[in-house]
Image (cartoon, rainbow, N blue to C red):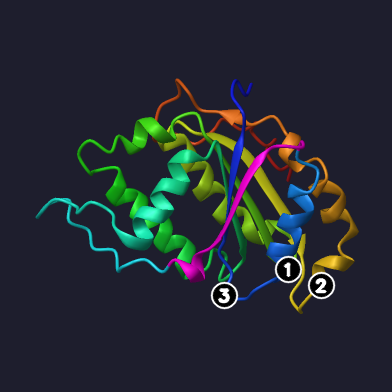
Amino acid sequence: MYNKPRRFLFLLCSTRRLGNSEQLAYCAAHPLPFGTEQEWLHLQDFLLPEFTDLRHHASFPQPVGNAKTLLTATVQATDVVLVSPLYMYNMPAQAKHYLDHWNAWLRIPNLNFRQQMAGKTLWSIVVSNVGKFEAQPLEESLILTAQYLKMQWGGMLHGTGSLPNDIQNDDHAQLLAKSFFATPPVSFVGTPEALPPTRPKKAPLMM
């Protein structure tokens, strides 16, 4: 499944430091095999310039500064882990802003961003204050993103919490975290770009 040493990029997307999602990510990373490369970046420390859609008017500029740092970290990773609380059923603004820049990187000549992302695994670690059903729209969006780039989808690890350190009381999430990165990913190589992954159809409700 993995033919080369793995390098994990953990992107901390919360506006808080050491929040619940970050703590859950540490729990998930702890069991990784000895020697597995890890890079932890807090998006608050690498603010990106405003994203402007230039597709129909001009060329996107080459990334510089923080954008170049995040681009380099992204393409050097085998596994990209988005770590975030759930805000309005989605990721915080800086996380979405980072993904918006993927749209630019796809269109920069000679960058070959799509080819470099193919085969990498995308993961999500999310904490919300009710249940995982709240994060379903985000999960489906990330699955489509992975599919579009021919990445693999590793899955979403969800925890429950709102107040600081609430995640310490979620024994189920901490148990799942221990084997999260051992989960076999879903591969989208060879699948149509725009179609969601196949899911079993639900039986019709009986009236």
**Residue 102, horizontal then vertical, whole percent:** 36, 49
Q: In percent of the image, x 62 and y 76: which residue is there?
A: 16
- Circles 1, 2 touching at the beta carbon (< 8 Å): yes
Residue sitting at the far bottom = 163
Instruction: Report the residue marked by disc 1.
Output: 20
Crowdedness near tag 2: few (<14), some (14–19) or many (≥20) residues, C-alpha within 10 Å: some
Q: Quadrant of residue 80?
A: top right
Crowdedness near tag 3: few (<14), some (14–19) or many (≥20) residues, C-alpha within 10 Å: some
Looking at the image, tell me whether mark 1 or mark 2 is earlier in sequence order.
1
Between label 3 and label 2, give the one nearer the viewer.
3
Instruction: Report the residue marked by disc 3.
Output: 15
Instruction: Report the residue marked by disc 2.
Output: 166
Amino acid found under the numbered disc labelled 1 = Asn
Looking at the image, tell me whether mark 3 or mark 1 is earlier in sequence order.
3
Crowdedness near tag 1: few (<14), some (14–19) or many (≥20) residues, C-alpha within 10 Å: many
Mark 3 to mark 1 CA distance (whole Å): 11 Å
Left or right: 20 in relation to 47: right
**Residue 49, horizontal then vertical, whole percent:** 31, 68
Amino acid found under the numbered disc labelled 3 = Thr
For residue 42: magenta? yes
Q: Nearer the viewer, residue 88 or 170?
A: 170
**Residue 10, horizontal then vertical, whole percent:** 60, 52
Looking at the image, tell me whether mark 3 or mark 2 is earlier in sequence order.
3
Q: Quadrant of residue 14?
A: bottom right
Left or right: 84 in relation to 58: right
Amino acid found under the numbered disc labelled 2 = Asp
- The residue range painted magenta reads 33-46
State the SS at label 1. helix
Left or right: 20 in relation to 147: right
Quadrant containing the N terminus is: top right
Residue sitting at the far left = 57
